[in-house]
Image (spheres, rainbow, N blue to C red):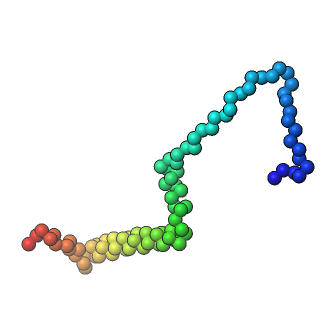
Amino acid sequence: MRHPLHVAVPVTPPGPRAAARPAARHRRPRRDSALRAGAAAPARVPPARRLAAGLGLTCVLVATALTALVLFVAGRSGRVTVVPFPSPHEE
């Protein structure tokens, strides 16, 4: 904000008058790159939905790790034999 007593005074440069410059050409705004758009995408998601998505992903990763751990420990102990599901094409 300008000071209320500010007064704009036109100033002409000393010396011979220079040729008038052509009007400034403004560039078109850049399009968002895929990287920039990808980085901005999470900002458009509401925080509660981001939290829910993060918790869902965390639950899936933990369940996967626990399943792998149980199968690994059970397989090493020899108590449980992991049997693959039968193929629907087998009879």
Q: Nearer the viewer, residue 75 or 82?
A: 82
Q: How many marks?
A: 0
Give the vertical position of 16 relative to 10 (above or below).
above
On the question of residue 76 being in view, the answer is yes
Q: Residue at x 52, y 55 (%)?
A: 39
On the question of residue 58 being in view, the answer is no
Q: Residue at x 25, y 79 (%)?
A: 79
The answer to whether residue 33 is left or right of residue 16 is: left
Quarter of the image holding residue 56? Answer: bottom left
Q: Could you tell me residue 15's position as x and y percent?
A: 85, 21
The residue positioned farthest toward the left in the image shown? 91
Quarter of the image holding residue 87? Answer: bottom left
Q: Could you tell me residue 66's position as x and y percent?
A: 37, 74
The residue positioned farthest toward the top in the image shown? 16
The answer to whether residue 73 is left or right of residue 27 is: left
**Quadrant in the picture for the C terminus:** bottom left
Q: Residue at x 48, y 72 (%)?
A: 52
Q: Nearer the viewer, residue 54 or 64?
A: 54
Give the vertical position of 90 relative to 22 (above or below).
below
Q: Could you tell me residue 19's position as x and y percent?
A: 74, 23
Give the vertical position of 38 relative to 61 (above or below).
above
The answer to whether residue 91 is left or right of residue 32 is: left
The residue positioned farthest toward the right in the image shown? 5
Q: Could you tell me residue 3's position as x and y percent?
A: 87, 51
The answer to whether residue 88 is left or right of residue 69 is: left
Quarter of the image holding residue 23? Answer: top right
Q: Nearer the viewer, residue 67 or 12?
A: 12
